[in-house]
């Protein structure tokens, strides 16, 4: 990938981190990884400076990247459920547009608040504590749809 355009590198990284899957959860994870990496590539100027620009990330930057990733995953999962609610006519299209705008900021803020900076790096995201954290934030977002997740 050396010398390739940022979009090509980004696509390769996404394929390595979250390959195209067949389940809804795999698709959600892929969209979240794509959203997170796109934001990191823009923030660190990978297009102009190459992938090495990410080497300049400090511990606080990595913690913020984890926050971005968790927020993106929860938001993408929530968006999937919002789509189901629209199909069920439980949420109007107008309300869905408002909710999309509000919930993205809500999730981002809640993740930042709960992780309080340094906790993002030390949490075992593949273990029970990481899964419980994600589920807790997701449930808080889901309640904004007027229900409790199953």
Image: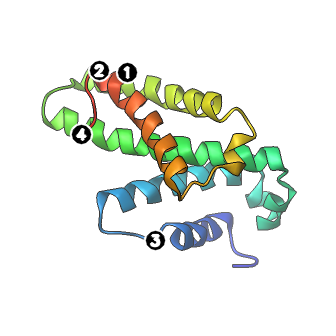
Image coordinates of residue 138 in percent, x first then y, are 42, 37
Residue at mark 4 to residue at mark 2: CA–CA distance: 22 Å
Question: Badge 4 is on which residue?
Answer: 150
Q: Characterize the local packing of mark 2: few (<14), some (14-19) or many (20 or more) Cα atoms within 10 angstroms.
A: few
Q: Is residue 64 above or below residue 148?
A: below
Q: Earlier in the sequence, mark 3 or mark 1?
A: 3
Question: Badge 1 is on which residue?
Answer: 98
Question: Badge 3 is on which residue?
Answer: 19
Query: Residue at the spot x=20%, y=33% of the render?
Result: 86
Question: Badge 2 is on which residue?
Answer: 95
Q: Earlier in the sequence, mark 4 or mark 1?
A: 1
Question: Mark 4 or 3, which is nearer the eye?
Answer: 4
Image coordinates of residue 136 in percent, x first then y, are 45, 36
Residue at mark 4 to residue at mark 3: CA–CA distance: 27 Å
Determine which of the numbered discs, if any, sits on residue 38 in the image: none
In the image: residue 132, left or right of residue 56: left
Image coordinates of residue 133 in percent, x first then y, are 51, 41
Q: Which quadrant: the C terminus?
A: top left
Dividing the picture into quadrants, the one containing residue 98 is: top left
Q: Characterize the local packing of mark 1: few (<14), some (14-19) or many (20 or more) Cα atoms within 10 angstroms.
A: few
Q: Earlier in the sequence, mark 4 or mark 2?
A: 2
Q: Is residue 118 above or below residue 4?
A: above
Q: Earlier in the sequence, mark 2 or mark 3?
A: 3
* SS assignment at label 1: helix
Residue at mark 2 to residue at mark 3: CA–CA distance: 33 Å
* SS assignment at label 3: loop
Query: Residue at the spot x=38%, y=45% of the render?
Result: 77
Q: Characterize the local packing of mark 4: few (<14), some (14-19) or many (20 or more) Cα atoms within 10 angstroms.
A: few
- Disc 4, disc 2: CB below 8 Å? no
Q: Is residue 65 above or below residue 85?
A: below
């Amino acid at each position: 990938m050396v010398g390739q355009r940022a979009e090509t590198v980004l696509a390769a990284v996404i394929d390595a981190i979250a390959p195209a899957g067949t389940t809804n959860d795999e698709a959600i994870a892929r969209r979240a990884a794509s959203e997170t990496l796109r934001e990191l590539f823009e923030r660190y100027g990978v297009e102009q400076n190459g992938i090495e620009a990410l080497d300049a990330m400090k511990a606080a930057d990595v913690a913020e990247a984890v926050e971005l990733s968790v927020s993106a995953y929860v938001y993408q999962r929530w968006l999937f459920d919002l789509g189901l609610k629209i199909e069920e006519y439980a949420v109007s299209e107008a309300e869905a547009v408002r909710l999309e705008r509000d919930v993205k900021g809500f999730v981002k803020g809640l993740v930042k608040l709960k992780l309080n900076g340094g906790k993002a790096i030390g949490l075992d995201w593949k273990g029970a504590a990481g899964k419980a954290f994600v589920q807790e934030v997701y449930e808080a977002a889901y309640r904004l749809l007027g229900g409790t997740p199953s």
